[in-house]
Amino acid sequence: MDESHRLGKRSYARSFPQTYALADQAARLSKWLTQDGRFVSGNRELLDQFCARVIEAGVPPSRSWLHIPTLHPEFAGVSRVWRRGMQTEERFLDFGFEKGPAYLNSPVRHVVEQRKLCRWRLDEGEALPFPVLEEHRSAGYVDYAIAPLIFSDGRVNAISWATDRSGGFSDADLCFFEEVLPTHSTIVEVKSLRRFATNVPGWD
């Protein structure tokens, strides 16, 4: 694996038609988020519909993971795991999770500190920097990307994508993710705050 994948840097060499098409799809998805996605009942449902529309745009995630700290008195955070063809899972995180080895030695901590999209190829046979990436490789994924979702108060959350498609993500796919991140982050934050304000069980 080359250094660019380890540090999340990459070239943007791609065809103009591919770039233009995905830029148009990113604009359409951002429009959907602001016009329709904001009315979806919660962040779990939003992740379901968001991933479905990412696939419709021609980007091939097989798995997506959303991590959000909460304002809940019993839980420090919640993660949601979407897998193609499966029901999205919710996992609540105990206070102090950020001090444990699973978090400290994870791409989540890395992207929270770096505040930029990072990507690792999983199909090149080389050692990977985090145990969870080795787990994804063993599960058959060939490419992995993770990006920060930054809320308006500066809190940094994370969303990741993995694919089992031969060849992994293209540079245009990664650019697509970056284009929709600001709008997606805004809608995710609104839904999290709405759950907090209305004191609904199962907070975002």
Image (tube, rainbow, N blue to C red):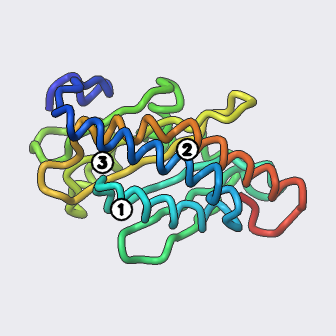
Could you tell me how far apart the alpha carbons at marks 2 and 1 are, in whole angstroms?
A: 37 Å
**Relative to 194, 3 lies left or right:** left
Q: Are there few (<14), some (14-19), or many (20+) residues within 10 Å of tag 1? A: few
Q: Earlier in the sequence, mark 2 or mark 3?
A: 2
According to the picture, the residue beneath numbered tag 2 turns out to be 100
The residue where tag 3 is placed is 133
Q: Secondary structure at mark 1?
A: helix
**106 relative to 124 in the view: left or right:** right
List the residue tagged with mark 1: 56
Callout 2: 10 Å neighbours few (<14), some, many (20+)? few
Whether residue 24 is visible to the viewer of this picture, yes or no, is yes
Mark 1 or 3: the one toward you: 1
Placement of the N terminus among the 4 image quadrants: top left
From what the image shows, is residue 128 above or below residue 80? above
Which amino acid is tagged 2?
Gly
Q: Nearer the viewer, residue 78 or 45?
A: 45
> What residue type is disc 3 on?
Leu
Under mark 1, the amino acid is Glu
Query: Is residue 7 depicted above or below 80 in this figure?
Result: above
**Can you give x and y, in whole percent of width and height, for residue 174 in the image?**
32, 38
The tally of labels here is 3
130 or 139, which lies in front? Answer: 139
Q: Dots 2 and 3: beta carbons under 8 Å? A: no
Estimate the spatial distance between the alpha carbons at disc 2 and disc 3, rounded to whole Å.
Answer: 17 Å
Residue 171 % position (x, y): 24, 35
Q: Could you tell me which residue is drawn at 32 percent across and 62 percent down? A: 62
* Location of residue 36 (image quadrant): bottom right
